[in-house]
Image (spheres, helix red, strand yellow):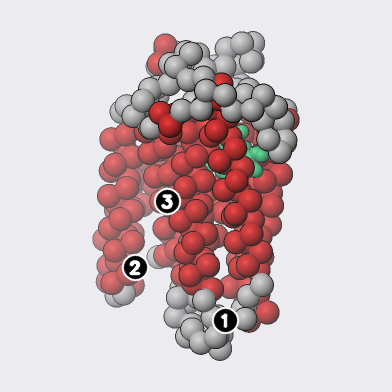
Amino acid sequence: MRTLTLILAIALLVITTTSAYIRFLQAGLGCADWPDCYGAHAASLTPALHESDPLFLPRAMHRVAASAAGILVLVIAAIGWEHWGRLRSQWIAVTLVVLAIALAWLGLATPSPLPLVTLGNLLGGMAMLALAMRLLATPSDRVSSVGNLRAWVWAAILLGVVQICLGGMLGARFGATICNTLPGCAGGIDGASLAVFNPIIPTAAGAFERGAIETLHLLHRAVATILALLAVRIACFTPRLRGRQRLVAYAIAVLVMAQIASGAWFVLGPTLWLALAHNVGAALLLTALVCLGALIAATPSKASP
Ligand code: HEM
């Protein structure tokens, strides 16, 4: 069962990565006359592709991984029900099946100018990966006290989800070429509008003022700063953790720093590969946070450090 779940997790990482890669190529980050073609909508592309098309291989990989994952979630839910015998794991297996059906349905509407579709694909895929790994992360390494570590981990998971949505909105609003300075945006945020956050307002040429996209950038950076502080707080607990718990806590700190570095690098010089690394980093960060939450689940909570 553990091997099957691990294969599922690998298939899910292939799905989230190829899905982002396809989206970036279609949206223009990887198109021939970048940045002029940036934001040219993908719906105009022909669905049937020749083998020499750069989208051919990622699409093929995406379909194979998605088919494998679809079968695996059903097998894991069916066999795993008896195998785990724990209500929480059984519910996670059912949630995986529901998410797989929802994403297959969403695939019919993809690509779309609606940010909601991008966010659904982004968050749905990353949530499936995190939940599959959660099935493998059983609380075996007991520690005497982890204080309020669980609360910090939960805060980081929730903020991580918010951050993934903000990043997805930035991508869906084609914001990569706006606000290419650090730490703030050079031109101020004139023309800020809350509509830019509404995922059911489609992205159309000239639909949003520059200042609205800049607000998204600044909020994404502010949340990254809070996530970094949370990662430091979680790292303070490492002397009390053991084995896999300590390893995952360190991984969280490294992943948050790597996300900030790849995000900053992307802002100064946007490229397809940096955007892809940023996407993979976010998926791994959410997975690591959910796994740490599971690994410390059965440890008694006494005092904070
Ligand atoms: C913990 C920190 C961070 C997390 C978890 C995170 C996560 C994400 C995610 C999930 C996306 C969407 C990727 C996609 O469309 O597939 C994104 C996009 C983006 N992020 Fe971050 N991010 C973080 C920090 C930063 C920082 C510090 C910056 C800049 C200084 C940044 C700049 C960007 C930009 C410019 C995009 C848009 C990329 C595009 O055009 O698709 N990020 N981020």
Label 1 Cα crowd, 10 Å radius (few <14 / some 14-19 / many 20+): few
* First reached walking from the N terminus: tag 3 or tag 1: 3
* First reached walking from the N terminus: tag 3 or tag 2: 2
Is residue 14 visible to the viewer in this orientation of the structure? no
Residue at the disc numbered 2: 89
Marks 1/2: CA distance?
28 Å
Please indicate whether residue 261 sits to the left or right of residue 125 in the image.
Answer: right
* First reached walking from the N terminus: tag 1 or tag 2: 2
Residue 248, horizontal then vertical, whole percent: 60, 66
Label 3 Cα crowd, 10 Å radius (few <14 / some 14-19 / many 20+): many
Please indicate whether residue 73 sits to the left or right of residue 272 in the image.
Answer: left
Please indicate whether residue 305 sits to the left or right of residue 113 in the image.
Answer: right
Q: Which callout, 3 or 1, points to the residue nearer the camera?
A: 1
Name which residue lies at 50% across and 53% down. Answer: 159
Is residue 153 visible to the viewer in this orientation of the structure? yes
Locate the C terminus by quadrant.
Answer: bottom right
Q: Are marks 1 and 2 in contact (CB under 8 Å)?
A: no
Residue 117, horizontal then vertical, whole percent: 37, 32
Q: What amino acid is labelled 3 in the image?
A: Ala
